[in-house]
Amino acid sequence: MSAESVSDSPQFPLSRLFWFCLALVLTAFHIGLIFSGLVPNLVSRPLHMALALPWIFVVPARGQAARVSGTILTLAGVAACLWIALNQNMLNDQYGFLEGNFQVVIAVTLLLAVLEAARRAIGWPLPLVALTALAYGLFGQYIPGEFGHSGTPLASFLGTLTIAEGGIWGSLTGVSVSVVSIFVIFGAVLNAGEAGQGFMNLASSAAGRLKGGAAKVSVISSALFGSISGSASANVASTGAITLPAMTRLGYPKRLAAAVEAVASSGGQIMPPLMGAGAFVMVELTGIPYTSIMSAAILPAILYFLAVWIGINAYARRFELKGLAEEDRPALRDVLITSAFFLVPFFVLLWGMFIAQYTAQYAACIAILAGAVMLLINGKLQIRPREIALKLENAALASARQVAMIASIILCASIIIGVLSITGLGVKITSLILSGSNEMLWPSLLLTALACLILGMEVPTTAAYVICISVAGPALTRLGLEPLQAHLFVFWFALLSTITPPVCGAVFIAAGMIGENWLKVALTAMALGVGLYIIPLGMIANPNVLRLTEDPAMALFAFARIAVGLGLVSYGLIGVRNLAAKIGLITLGLAAVFAWAAV
């Protein structure tokens, strides 16, 4: 809906006002937590879930049955969450053991609400994994052999998951409350203003005139946009609406245009600062500061987009792809003005983290305020009150929807992590990985990569990463990997499913937007996105690439080695027709990346 159509509306519907106010409450709650100091976990985390539930159960409901059931589930779930928050002092003294039938009802209500919220938000796969974990926790004592467990009393099992600071109120949910939500709000505020247009203008100005310029604009704009959206699907839908028509007008093959957008958009989940919430989960699971994770992740992310760029150059030579016409490129004044809409908040964020030494979430809160101020003017440096009101509404509603989406995923994944902890299954799976690989690192890496790919096909990247690292992480660190190496390796491979058949979400969306066969797009995307398959292994063979702050010289040397290797592989796959030359270039490239591992 445009600002003009809203400004012409004769009234502000009551229901719309209600949801806007509820979104403001959710936003204010999460920002307020950062400024207000310590709030007990059994208060903040249940309230986080209570505020998220209406946005999962009621807002997207279609049809009478869905609305009625969603309203009932919302009321029941919110009541159970409020009961936990109001009785947190009493529950702390119960140490995760339910007392009485009423508390059992509360526990069951919370688990059902979490499972159904995840199902409505992202479909069946993740809730089915959580249900399987619950079934194992309840009945695993009847499984013979080493994969059974000794059994846990029902009151203790359900209580640990629902009334203690484990299970759904565990540390992962804490990350969702105090960090992920803040950065999601930050991204929503930027997207509500002119930041998105600023990304496109900057990319068009920087790369539009180059050969294959329209594709390169897609790469740059998707990297910039993805750094704050953290979602491959959202990235394709937003930047693709502009870049896909531009590429087709210039004669790009449809499969190539869609593949470029899918691959570039997938890279947003590995580009700091947001990384699809993965960076913040890593902070909690590894204890490594957020700024250290950002610095470790930046060079591999650049390598990914570098490989895509080289692939586009090879395609540009094959298909004689043109750059954007001069009239389609923005004027310098427009670039400078619109770029300020994201550069100012980003500068505030980086100043807060690296100069003022604030925590990441505190710096993000200040950046949110800077972004909100930027909403007061438009790209023409005009102040229009009704346009400002629309931007504020869009920012609040987008914040609420995205916070709720991530909350539903993390709460459901927390059930799985809780069961792994209670039953000891995670340790058993770790032992299985070690025995299956004969306690050798590279076979363990390949087994883990396969598990990440399979799980990532059906659940969001962050959830796949959390589950995989919980069971495979201890095995990898035991075999000599540093914790951050293991976590980044698993996170990258959990992302493979965005472009890898049979389930490749970013490819499906891009192919549908342009009207091309998805399998053709997927095959082209896999060639363009070859870095997604090689770089995680390259991080293991060249660990210095992750040590930019500790040893910049060695990090840049490792970066250069991998870059040369990736360039040879990418050009060999795309730019060479002769089979012998193709094999030779790919072999040389792989040797450049992995020979160092043998030294």
Image: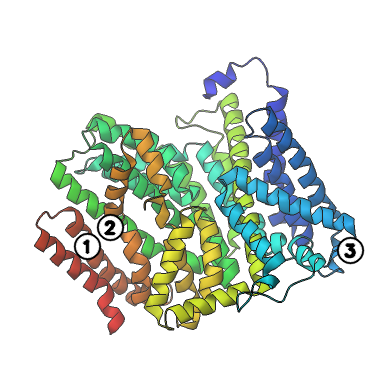
Q: CA distance from mark 1 to mark 2?
A: 9 Å
- The amino acid type found where label 3 is placed reads Glu
Asked whether disc 3 touches disc 2, contact meaning CB atoms under 8 Å apart, the reply is no
User: Neighbour class for label 1 at 10 Å: few (<14), some, many (≥20)?
Assistant: many
Percent position (x, y) of residue 213?
24, 42
Asked whether disc 1 touches disc 2, contact meaning CB atoms under 8 Å apart, the reply is yes
Give residue 441's quadrant in the image.
Answer: bottom left
Q: Is residue 469 above or below residue 249?
A: below
Q: Name the residue beneath numbered marker 1.
A: 569
| Mark nearer the N terminus (1 vs 3) | 3
- The amino acid type found where label 1 is placed reads Val
Q: Nearer the viewer, mark 1 or mark 2?
A: 1
| Mark nearer the N terminus (3 vs 2) | 3
Colour mapping used in the image: rainbow
Q: Name the residue beneath numbered marker 3.
A: 99
Residue found 27% across the figure and 48% down from its top = 524
Q: Nearer the viewer, mark 3 or mark 2?
A: 3
- Viewer-closest of 82 and 337: 82
Percent position (x, y) of residue 515?
33, 32
Q: CA distance from mark 3 to mark 2?
A: 58 Å
User: Neighbour class for label 2 at 10 Å: few (<14), some, many (≥20)?
Assistant: many
Give residue 470's quadrant in the image.
Answer: bottom right
Secondary structure at badge 1 equals helix
- The amino acid type found where label 2 is placed reads Ala
Secondary structure at badge 3 equals loop
Percent position (x, y) of residue 44?
75, 56
